Amino acid sequence: MRLFRLLKIASVASRFGLDEMVLEHEPSGRLVRLANALQFWRNLSAPRAERLRLALESLGPIFVKFGQVLSTRRDLMPPDIADELARLQDRVPPFDSAQALREIERAYGRPAHEVFAEFDPVPVASASIAQVHFAKLREEDGGHEVAVKILRPNMHDVIEHDLALMDSLALLLEKLWSDGKRLKPREVVAEFAKYLRDELDLMREAANASQLRRNFTDSKLLIVPEVHWDFCTSTVMVMERMKGVPISQIDRLRSEGIDLKKLSEAGVEIFFTQVFRDGFFHADMHPGNIFVAPDGRYIALDFGIVGTLTDSDKNYLAQNFLAFFRRDYKRVAEAHIESGWAPKDTRVDEFEAAIRAVCEPIFDRPLKDISFGKVLLRLFQTSRRFNVEIQPQLVMLQKTLLNIEGLGRQLDPELDLWKTAKPFLERWMSEQIGWRGLLKTFKQEAPYLARTIPQLPRLVHQTLAAPRPDLQPQLAALIAAQRQQNRWLAIIALLLALLVGALFA
């Protein structure tokens, strides 16, 4: 099976000229000419980025998903390829409705018309892993309008084979490319595999949705649909149907009186709240997954990919963001070295100067005049010079930040990301480090202290009453050593006195 899949990948790569994209790095150009001569029947007139996108679409949903992830790694590829791969977000054909009905019957043990009062067999959305149908629950189950997400059939086997092949290709890249080890392609593939396997379990996605909904209970910025747990399985997820305007339909939002400037600022605040307050963030915020409610609040959909951060990650990132916003490039350089991202022998002044050259030109400019793709590319070039290691665990955070950039460009090209984010980060740092942080920590530790403090008298008594070891032998040995040392000192003093007397006699 794996050999057959590998042959298919090689065939598709040849048909779309992907070998040419690899061999073009050979300086002499002879290998490219030889490959094109041996495959003279190919039509390679289309741009390379378009050919790569078409190849990924031909290879199936897993490669489409991988292309979607790669489209956010603008630090690893040219802008034309990243822009073309971004088109994969909404170009996944749905699977047959009859298959969807069979999956529902397999999940519930009964046909769809017995589970739902109404079920629309025509999907309203289709992605690389699953597709969504609208339905209505029966009256005895509440009669709610719902969205039913159904996993694509037979995904597990296909995914495991494709992931194994991706890991092999990443190993080759790591061995053959000079930057391979530093960029950690196998770790990037492993990170992708982890999130992809998570997406295959719709119960996990339902849990993600519930957590995010709980984090934003009564929020004036974000709405998260309610999960109907009685109808959720690992292959089918049922949640509240949300009604709103896709965030990409700017003209319609304007016609409905939505304040786009306020909406763009709210998007930034939602992102930083998820990252720094909760350490739990929606990591797939492309326009297809974001709607806007009539009251102007965001509606989040598709919770298959979420990112998490530890307290140390949050603190480190906040310090870096604040240092960037304050243009304290020395602190940015120091933080990279302290965290181990950059080698310990890196000269802070040189690293600081390099970061300043990349970041200084983008400040005090509206978002429409800033290309984060170019900024990230220059940061990537700088990191290569200073041997900075790419951190795979932060790939999802970077991906989400780029999604926020895209939304900001659509809603308000004049948005100043820095001025919008800086007050929030300063407030968060104050809450973590100042007296508010102390009070918060005390509240978190209060249950432990409540259990421990009453036990302190008993613990002290046990410590004082515990039998002490016999120290007499050690004390005698110390006294004997001290006496011997004193005798030697007396002898040395006497000898010195005699020597001085002889010299001056």
Image (cartoon, rainbow, N blue to C red):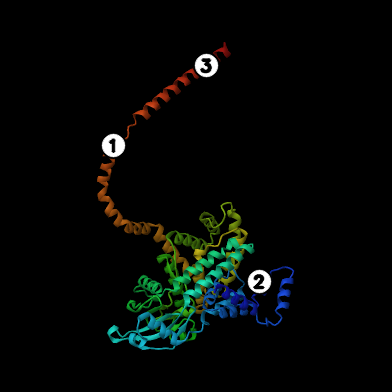
- Which label is found at residue 484? none
Indicate the secondary structure of the residue bearing disc 2: helix
Q: In which quadrant will I find the N terminus?
A: bottom right
* Residue at numbered disc 2: 22
Indicate the secondary structure of the residue bearing disc 3: helix
Indicate the secondary structure of the residue bearing disc 1: loop
Compared to 99, does 201 lie above or below?
above
Number of labelled discs?
3
Q: CA distance from mark 3 to mark 1?
A: 48 Å
Lateral position of residue 282 relative to residue 342, left or right: left
Q: CA distance from mark 2 to mark 1?
A: 75 Å
* Residue at numbered disc 1: 467
Earlier-in-chain disc, 3 versus 2: 2
Note whether residue 432 is visible: yes
Look at 27% across and 54% down and name the residue there.
450
* Residue type indicated by callout 3: Leu
Lateral position of residue 295 relative to residue 355, left or right: left
Mark 3 nearby-residue class (10 Å; few <14, some 14–19, many ≥20): few
Look at 34% across and 29% down and name the residue there.
472
* Residue type indicated by callout 2: Val
* Residue type indicated by callout 1: Pro
Earlier-in-chain disc, 3 versus 1: 1
* Residue at numbered disc 3: 495
Foreground residue, 252 or 61? 61
The percent coordinates of residue 129 (x first, y second) are 47, 78
Look at 73% across and 78% down and name the residue there.
37
**Disc 3 vs disc 2: which is toward the camera?**
2
